[in-house]
Image (cartoon, rainbow, N blue to C red):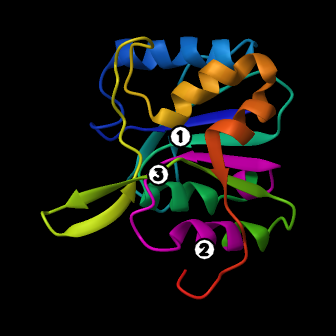
Amino acid sequence: MRWIVSTGKDIYVDNSQLQARLSYIRQVTNSEVTEWKILQIEGTSKQFLYCISDDGLNGTFITAHIDEVRIICCLYDIASGDFVIANSCIWKKSLDKRILQDMMKVNRGIELWFAKQEVSVEGGHMLRQCTTLNNLGRFGFHTSLSERQLFTKRRNGFMAAVHEAYVKVSPVSLLGD
């Protein structure tokens, strides 16, 4: 499985937190994990870091801002996997569904999971769905509620824990979506 982290200063804080994230990945997958490598996506100036866990899963776990998640999910190698887990805020209405629909053009069977969202007030007047990365405590890096739940439920198996800790995105759009 691929694990991708944004190099934005509010997600990638420092090397010690990045190493703590590797330790977390080892614990939740119960597998060997490569060191971090640089991912440069052609046509963008954005850089990401990635590692691979040797767990036999064909999926991607992304911790990044929603626009970065969208860029990453446009990559054929990502969209052709079995699933994507996005540890990200959904700041733009229904963008999670649009990302899934775009990936389904490559792979009809792909699943997209998003971190559980909270409503926050941005700029004093805009309500947005977000997953605040906080709680440095136990893990040594800022975590979302879903990451903490994934860790707690990991003994049930990785995908069973994902089902409990993350929200599966439906490709169906309803009125109001």
* Image height of 165 relative to 110, above or below: above
Residue 110's x, y, as percent? Answer: 80, 58
* Image height of 166 relative to 44, above or below: above
In the rendered image, residue 151 lying in the magenta stretch gets the answer no
Q: CA distance from mark 2 to mark 3?
A: 17 Å
Q: Which residue is mark 3?
A: 117
Looking at the image, do the residues carrying marks 2 and 1 touch, with CB atoms under 8 Å apart? no
Q: Residue furthest left?
A: 124
Task: Name the amino acid, label 3.
Answer: Gln
Looking at the image, do the residues carrying marks 3 and 1 touch, with CB atoms under 8 Å apart? no
Visible residue check, residue 177: yes
In the rendered image, residue 91 lying in the magenta stretch gets the answer yes
Residue 50: name its quadrant: top right
* Image height of 160 relative to 123, above or below: above
At label 2, counting other C-alpha atoms closer than 10 Å, the crowd grade (few under 14, some 14-19, many 20 or more) is some
Q: Which residue is mark 2?
A: 98
Which image quarter is the N terminus in? Answer: top right
Q: Residue at x 56, y 37 (%)?
A: 4
Residue 65's x, y, as percent? Answer: 41, 52
Secondary structure beneath label 3: loop
Secondary structure beneath label 1: strand
Q: CA distance from mark 2 to mark 1?
A: 24 Å
Please give the range of residues in magenta.
78-101
Task: Name the amino acid, label 2.
Answer: Arg
Task: Name the amino acid, label 1.
Answer: Leu
At label 1, counting other C-alpha atoms closer than 10 Å, the crowd grade (few under 14, some 14-19, many 20 or more) is some
Secondary structure beneath label 2: helix
Q: Which residue is mark 1?
A: 39
Q: Residue at x 72, y 31 (%)?
A: 161
In depth, the one of 82 and 36 nearer the eye is: 82
